Amino acid sequence: MDAVPANQGRIAAEFARLAQHGKKALVTFITAGDPGIDFTVPAMHSLVAGGANLLELGIPFSDPEAEGPAIQAANERALANGMTLAKVLDMVVEFRASNSTTPVVLMGYLNSVLAMTNFAQRAKDAGVDGLIMVNLPQEEAADLRHTLSAVGMDLVSLIAPTTADPRAQEIVTTASGFLYYVSLKGTTGSGALAVDEVAERMSFLQTLTDVPICVGFGIKDAKSAAAVSAHADGVVVGSALVQLMADSADPNIAAERLHSAAADIRHGLDG
Amino acid sequence: MAEPILDANAAQTYAQPTDSGYFGQFGGRFVAETLTHALDSLAALYAEMKDDPEFKKELHEDLAHFVGRPTPLYLAERLTASLGGAAVYLKREDLNHTGAHKVCNTIGQALLAKRMGKPRVIAETGAGQHGVATATVAARLGLACDVYMGEEDVHRQSLNVYRMKLMGANVIPVTSGSKTLKDAMNEAMRDWVTNVDDTHYIIGTVAGPHPYPMLVRDFASIIGQEARAQMLQQVGKLPDVVVACVGGGSNAMGIFHPFINDAEVDLVGVEAGGHGVSTGAHAAPLNDGKVGVLHGNRSYLMSDDDGQVMETHSVSAGLDYPGVGPEHSYLKDIGRATYAAATDDEAMEAFRMLNRQEGILPALETSHALAWVVENAPKMSADKTILVNLSGRGDKDILTVADIDGITL
């Protein structure tokens, strides 16, 4: 399999900037169109203002089989609000109108992307920088990786606690943008984060590649973020933010809460 | 009927899937990275056990003495006479222990779980037949068992829920999404990703990620192996048509597979036409779906323009599924099998006919295959034969049928 050259876009630029300042990346996940269509773009801006470095935007899907209860519910709410992948791209366009630097990565399930004609070019044109496909392991990813790469987008690879060493070695050869290390066996938002195990695994993975590695699943606050970030290039926080939005009555309240949550985690990361 | 493009030579060499689980463009392994290790291990163990004399002996002893195989091949004389055409033979899978073919697969997989040293099995179920078959073998082998079942189906199939509980299984109602089979499968995947170290997921149909479509097919193929030998022995020739209902498609794959190289035998799958394929309220992705990815494989799927999986409708909970096993998609595309659909009403009519004319109570799922026979046997001459997979018995459906008849039992 050919190695795909790293794309010199916003993702690479942001990680380079963070490395230069000796800082860790705060990656945040929210589901597009949840809990209301008008929540999403203000939420993206306030996460950035609070200190997020990279935004993951979930593509709502009818069968989110790897998600825990918080993000499942978010998917259901977003679909009930009439969300589609086309509308997710519209939101990125709207976000880009006043933010041209923060990387945006879409995260979701393969069937959404397969259903859109010319997805890669449309996503690129909207201002999307990368894609995380939950149900697309290495063996199945080559075609989509090349399609994305052709337009300058990264397909972010995932590595799990159950990924054997030789397999991890193969995955890193095609890694672009960053690597997503799934911190635990479970669904998103699960509770049992074992920092020691993450540390041990990360020290191995870091010998394999210079691509930045971010750790996600089970990180919910400044404390868990700080503990994990000591061993990683960044952390991903998702379910906790999604839950916080679900509990907010309107977009302004949600934006304020996201701002302070992001700022709090940022503080934890910066020690 | 589409013209088969398999020439005789190709038919002789049918060997699917590929090592990576592909049947043509269908199949594969579209799962979270966390599960790939477990799937690799399962595939490796199965490759080893497949030809292991000890494993085969254990499996066949259970099939003979616990399940009661071989099941009979039975000429439905009165049905044949009343339809006035081809002779109709029934492969009596309703006579398996637990009342359906499903147990052949669950025994095979539970024995694999035992070899892997996994003390717990999980399953998804729609009508409850696969759940019951899993609970049964878990009890037989002393394994812990959790069964995921859509909340809607828990209400629709209360008898099977109680059967599972009697056998020590824990039935977990699923309240997410459409609260039916596909959501039960999502929830089972979530459980497996969390408990992958000590748990084996017994998928109940020829779907899911590789190696499931292959191994479920292989365990179900005992149906077709027996039926093929019985046809030759009892009738003196192979059937002209083999017909089976298709939800996920395990009973159909099980009876089709041993006949795939017999180019002269037509293979017909019958999907759930619900209120009619043209109404959209059905569960017939091979008749009215497009290629997509769900539950670990690429296959025909009922999904909308945005890639969202659509809600399905069928009178039979066991066929109420938006996807279909990838090997069926392959057999459809290469023209080796054809796929029809029967509506709820047509299935109900065939259900009543078999009760009255043969004294056999078929499952509503099975009744879809019978509906095809009712429509097509009269068009065939009396020297032709149809082999029907009578995949399960209908005791579980009595409350549903009574309800349709406006009767409260």
Image (cartoon, rainbow, N blue to C red):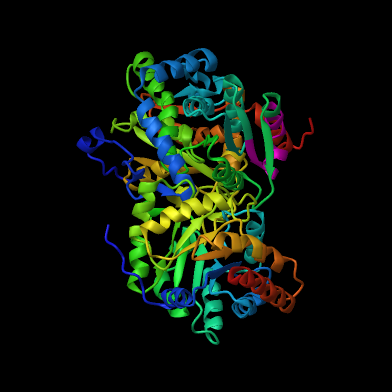
- Residue B51, quarter of the rendered image: top left
- Residue A235, quarter of the rendered image: bottom right
Nearer to the camera, A257 or B182 = A257
**Residue A233 visible to the viewer:** yes
Q: Give the magenta-colored segment's residue range.
A: B147-163
Q: Residue at left 66%, top 32%?
A: B397
**Residue B86 visible to the viewer:** no
Q: Residue at left 70%, top 39%?
A: B154
Tell which residue pokes out farthest to the left in this image: B9
Q: Where is residue B176 in the image (x, y as percent from the top left)?
A: 66, 51
Residue B41 to residue B108: above or below:
below
Q: Residue at left 49%, top 73%?
A: A22
Tell which residue pokes out farthest to the right in this image: B408
- Residue B161, quarter of the rendered image: top right
Q: Quadrant of the N terminus of chain B?
A: top left
Tell which residue pokes out farthest to the top in this image: B65
Q: Position of residue B245 (x, y in %)?
A: 49, 36
Magenta span contains residue B155 = yes
Magenta span contains residue B152 = yes
Q: Position of residue B30 (x, y in %)?
A: 44, 50
Residue B177 to residue B261: above or below:
below
Nearer to the camera, B325 or B215 = B215
Residue A141 to residue A262: above or below:
above
Q: Residue at left 55%, top 26%?
A: B100
Q: Position of residue B283 (x, y in %)?
A: 54, 47
Residue B47 to residue A235: above or below:
above
- Residue A23 located left or right of residue B18: right
Q: In which quarter of the image is the C terminus of chain B?
A: top right
Numbered marks: total: 0
